[in-house]
Image: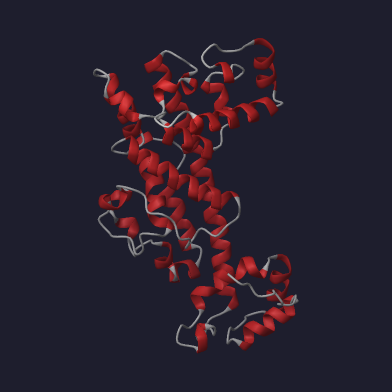
């Protein structure tokens, strides 16, 4: 497909303010707006002005009457705080998931190196997929300079997998495992292997899922995908408040008040709440924190529907 030479010039903060004024956006303090745009990339910021646009204007590029730059800035700050909140919640859930996955499969297999045993993973088309993630763990663990890693390297090996004999038990390896790697391990686990076992171990993965509030292991894996998506946006300072996200499984049917948009953050945040409640994690009151964020931002309240949050969401029995 042919492309066009990029020829848009650099624009100063004053140029940007002038352009926004030309598009009918209003300002409470133009000098402060210029200062803001000297510190925040306009390309990064302008999406927060998008809800203020008038779709009926020429090409939909002008702003509605009485819309202010400061509303967009308020949404930007709201999004910053939301990312911090969700990143901390996901961190707690990720650590819990690593631990509970390891406890469940180590207890079943009596093997702290279960993640190196091909019997537990999909291998119909070979071991290339799971081996690629083992290799990633191997590289990361080899490069880890913390004392615990150096101590293991100097003293131990395993006899479970010759290619990965230098890898430690999962509870040590998990210290270098990213949420992406954790997800790939979950996706590679052959749950049918466990279903063929005699009771009660045939429910090993189902019981793990239920600990996190999911009905089965497939739903749990789907939920971790959604956590990964939100976590990555938070970690890379990407917009979250009205981001388009895949809808998580199961959770919508548990709500009494329907979300305003299934592909916005609300349903993924509901998953976090369900996990927190099911795990009885102390020190996290997600509902109260979200209410505080919305109450502190008039703009976030105005455009709440863009997040997928319905009006009165906090009164839904799901959030009790």
Say left or right for 12 vs 280. Answer: right
Picture layout, residue 71 above or below residue 276? below
Q: Nearer the viewer, residue 276 or 192?
A: 192
* Colouring used for the render: secondary structure
Q: Is residue 164 above or below residue 179?
A: above
Q: Nearer the viewer, residue 160 or 127?
A: 127
Point out residue 278 in the picture as x, y percentages from the top left corner.
34, 37
Return the residue nearer the eye: 182 or 196.
Answer: 196
Between 60 and 87, the one lying in front of the other is 60
Q: Residue at x 39, y 59 (%)?
A: 263
Asked whether, in this view, residue 6 is left or right of residue 110, the answer is right
The reply to whether residue 80 is in sight is yes
Residue ID at (65%, 20%): 148
Q: Position of residue 41 (x, y in %)?
A: 68, 66
Residue plotted at (60% across, 12% down): 157
Q: 205 above or below 307?
A: above
User: Eyeballing the image, is 12 above or below 160?
Assistant: below
Pinpoint residue 99: horizontal percent, then vertical percent.
47, 27
């Amino acid at each position: 497909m042919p492309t066009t030479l990029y020829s848009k010039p650099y624009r100063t903060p004053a140029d940007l303010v002038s352009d926004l004024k030309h598009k009918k956006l209003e300002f409470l303090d133009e000098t402060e707006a210029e200062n803001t745009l000297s510190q925040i990339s306009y390309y990064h910021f302008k999406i927060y002005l998008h809800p203020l646009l008038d779709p009926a204007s020429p090409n939909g590029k002008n702003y509605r009457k009485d819309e202010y730059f400061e509303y967009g800035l308020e949404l930007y700050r709201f999004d910053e705080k939301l990312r911090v909140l969700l990143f901390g919640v996901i961190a707690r859930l990720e650590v819990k998931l690593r631990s509970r996955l390891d406890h469940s499969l180590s207890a079943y297999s009596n093997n702290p190196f279960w993640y190196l045993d091909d019997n537990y993973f999909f291998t119909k088309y070979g071991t290339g997929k799971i081996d690629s993630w083992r290799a990633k763990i191997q590289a990361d663990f080899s490069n880890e300079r913390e004392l615990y890693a150096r101590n293991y390297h100097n003293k131990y090996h395993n006899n479970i997998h010759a290619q990965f004999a230098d890898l430690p038990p999962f509870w040590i390896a998990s210290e270098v495992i990213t949420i992406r790697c954790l997800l790939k391990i979950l996706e590679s686990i052959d749950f049918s292997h466990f279903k063929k076992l005699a009771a009660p171990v045939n429910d090993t993965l189902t019981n793990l899922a239920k600990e996190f509030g999911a009905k089965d292991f497939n739903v749990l894996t789907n939920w971790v995908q959604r956590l990964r998506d939100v976590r990555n946006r938070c970690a890379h300072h990407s917009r979250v408040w009205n981001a388009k996200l895949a809808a998580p499984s199961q959770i919508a049917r548990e709500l009494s008040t329907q979300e305003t948009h299934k592909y916005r953050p609300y349903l993924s945040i509901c998953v976090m709440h369900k996990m927190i409640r099911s795990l009885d994690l102390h020190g996290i009151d997600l509902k109260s924190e979200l209410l505080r964020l919305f109450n502190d931002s008039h703009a976030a309240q105005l455009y709440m529907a863009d997040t997928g949050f319905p009006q009165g969401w906090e009164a839904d029995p799901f959030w009790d």
